[in-house]
Image (spheres, rainbow, N blue to C red):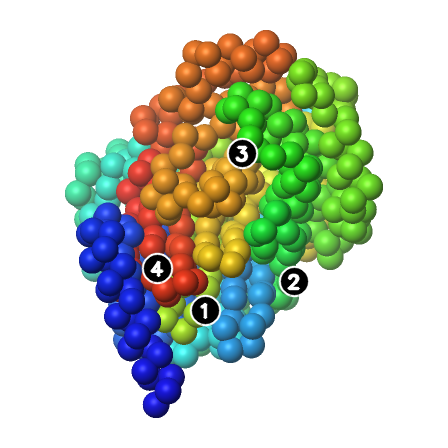
């Protein structure tokens, strides 16, 4: 009775706040649950599950599977990802590692020619570019260990959209145009994702009956519905006939791994982020560890960007040198995050001059590329949270579909170091730590994250290839400054990843005076425009949900650069 009275008073106080401060803005609604995802149909599927009594983990399955259908350019059953969880009843933080694994027959030099040079495109297109997918196993695992509903119920929305179709949007068309040549090279991919071998018009209804059958098989048979039996045989036969190296053993031995997230503090904020084989958590902890000694709120914008850039430069350098699959290599995490190492990096920063990256490493300059992945964020009425970043790597992955499966395969093998010191498609340089080996998971930049302080909790993440870490970093800094969900996702962004040695920045992120100041400090600046406008695919597609701990209200926002949707209820 006492608790009921307290709850009633809390609700009355919440209503009084609205009266005193006026109507809330769009996306800033007092509520008990919130979802933000990159596609409206996925957000609606997840929210419907929550309204039916499911928890955040059930909604995560619904969203993951729906995105696999309606965002084939970003994620899918043929891809992988990381699901960062907070389970309220146990007060536990868990990272579900559903990252792809290299086929057992994979070798260190499999993408090199006879002269030892990387063969362009070989790790990006076709059956040989694909790792063993983790998304199906992750969904089954979430349902079995954390969800309240059956797998069949959680996958129902995805099955419906795959069988009966959905209307493609302009983002689909832009990415299909980008990969048109590659899609045309695979008859099955062209049949499914193109219309008479051309990019379908906006509003075209895309149906994927084979994918619907595969989803139904998973819903009925769980892990065996994908990793053994008819579906597995069709996957392996399709891959091997196209000169790929998958085997039934590869699929049979794939397993989800529960890992401990990276947890650290930045001033009065606690950050929980992805652990290896994601480089995100460690890189964020290093960068923010360096920055913690500075009062960023007391300096002007160019000085702040200089310090953030110098800190990112050093964290990305460590990423290239030390990080990979923790099941295969020993990552010196304690040393990387230790006070001595972070202080050493901080002491190497000059306030009046940029440090050339060649002074940190002699690896040659590379190019920055990368377009799309996907992300969603959830907080449910029970207090559970999910931050999930999923990918098939480059848009439409390997542009390869094994016949009869409807499963578009990833090209995540490109995330390995095909040759140490040579960049991948995202311009990221890796060392021996991330070299190819059978059964190994490639290093990733995907960084699903929670941010907590005494007033608020944020569930945040974004796609963006090599820029994911820097974009989440900027989101953390904005959250720490008290910014709203809408302000955080709308922030103009900049990026530095150690190599190439320049600050890449979004239109309107810097004015002429700020750019001039940074050049005076020795920084090279490049304003990179999206070929599609609005920053699409270049500066992320951030999704955030924020809980106000004082009154229990939830706000959510989807990145204005994309076509996502946030819903609160």
Q: Nearer the viewer, mark 4 or mark 1?
A: 4
Labelled disc at residue 457: none
Q: Earlier in the sequence, mark 1 or mark 3?
A: 3
Dot 2 and dot 1 residues touching (CB under 8 Å): no
Foreground disc of the pair 2, 3? 3
Dot 4, crowdedness within 10 Å: few (<14), some or many (≥20)? many
Report the residue that reaches farthest toward the left.
203
Q: CA distance from mark 3 to mark 4?
A: 26 Å
Check disc 4 and report its element: helix, strand or loop: strand
Q: Residues within 10 Å of mark 3 (few under 14, many from 20)?
A: few
Examine the rendered structure and indicate whether residue 495 appears above or below residue 268: above
Of residues 7 and 156, the one drawn nearer to the viewer in this rendering = 7
Q: Circle 3 sits on which residue?
A: 297
Sequence-first disc among 2 and 1: 2
Write down the residue under mark 1: 384
The first of marks 4 and 1 along the sequence is 1
Q: CA distance from mark 1 to mark 3?
A: 32 Å
Which quadrant holds the N terminus? bottom left
Residue bearing the label numbered 4: 554
Gap in angstroms between the C-alphas marked 2 and 1 = 17 Å
Q: Which circle marks residue 260 in the picture?
A: 2
């Amino acid at each position: 009775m006492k608790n009921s009275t307290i709850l009633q008073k809390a609700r009355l106080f919440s209503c009084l706040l609205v009266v005193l401060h006026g109507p809330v803005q769009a996306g800033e609604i007092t509520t008990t649950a919130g979802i933000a995802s990159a596609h409206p149909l996925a957000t609606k599927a997840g929210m419907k599950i929550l309204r039916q009594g499911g928890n955040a983990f059930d909604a995560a399955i619904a969203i993951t599977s729906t995105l696999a259908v309606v965002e084939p350019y970003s994620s899918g059953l043929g891809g992988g990802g990381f699901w960062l969880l907070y389970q309220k009843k146990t007060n536990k933080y868990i990272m579900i590692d559903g990252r792809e694994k290299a086929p057992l027959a994979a070798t260190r030099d499999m993408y090199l020619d006879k002269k030892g040079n990387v063969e362009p495109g070989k790790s990006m297109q076709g059956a040989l570019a694909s790792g063993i997918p983790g998304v199906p196993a992750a969904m089954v695992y979430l349902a079995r260990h954390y969800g309240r509903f059956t797998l069949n119920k959680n996958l129902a929305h995805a099955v419906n959209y795959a069988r009966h179709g959905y209307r493609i949007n302009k983002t689909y068309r832009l990415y299909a145009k980008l990969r048109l040549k590659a899609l045309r090279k695979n008859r099955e991919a062209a049949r499914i994702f193109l219309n008479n071998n051309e990019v379908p018009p906006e509003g075209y209804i895309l149906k994927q009956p084979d994918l619907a059958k595969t989803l139904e098989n998973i819903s009925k048979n769980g892990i065996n519905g994908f990793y053994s039996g008819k579906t597995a045989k069709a996957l392996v036969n399709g891959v091997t006939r196209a000169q790929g190296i998958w085997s039934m053993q590869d699929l049979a031995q794939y397993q989800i791994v529960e890992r401990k997230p990276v947890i650290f503090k930045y001033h009065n904020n606690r950050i929980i982020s992805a652990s290896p084989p994601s480089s995100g958590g460690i890189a964020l902890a290093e960068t923010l560890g360096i920055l913690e000694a500075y009062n960023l709120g007391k300096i002007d914008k160019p000085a702040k960007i200089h310090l953030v850039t110098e800190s990112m430069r050093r964290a990305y350098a460590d990423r290239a040198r030390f990080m990979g699959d923790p099941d295969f290599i020993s990552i010196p995490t304690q040393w990387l995050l230790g006070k001595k190492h972070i202080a050493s990096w901080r002491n190497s920063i000059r306030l009046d001059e940029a440090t050339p990256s060649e002074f940190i490493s002699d690896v040659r300059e590379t190019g920055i590329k990368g377009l799309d992945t996907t992300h969603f964020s959830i907080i449910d009425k029970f207090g559970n949270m999910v931050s999930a970043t999923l990918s098939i790597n480059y848009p439409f992955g390997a542009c390869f579909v094994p016949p009869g499966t409807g499963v578009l395969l990833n090209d995540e093998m490109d995330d390995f170091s095909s040759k140490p010191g040579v960049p991948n498609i995202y311009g990221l340089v890796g060392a021996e730590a991330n070299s190819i080996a059978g059964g190994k998971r490639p290093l990733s930049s995907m960084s699903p994250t929670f941010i907590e302080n005494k007033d608020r909790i944020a569930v945040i993440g974004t796609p963006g290839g090599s820029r994911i870490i820097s974009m989440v970093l900027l989101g953390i800094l904005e959250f720490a400054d008290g910014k709203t969900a809408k302000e955080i996702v709308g922030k103009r962004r900049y990026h530095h990843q150690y190599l190439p040695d320049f600050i890449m920045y979004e239109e309107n992120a810097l004015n002429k005076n700020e750019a001039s100041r940074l050049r005076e400090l020795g920084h090279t600046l490049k304003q990179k425009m999206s070929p599609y406008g609005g920053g699409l695919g270049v500066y992320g597609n951030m999704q955030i949900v924020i809980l106000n701990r004082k009154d229990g209200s939830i706000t959510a926002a989807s990145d204005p650069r994309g076509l996502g949707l946030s819903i609160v209820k």
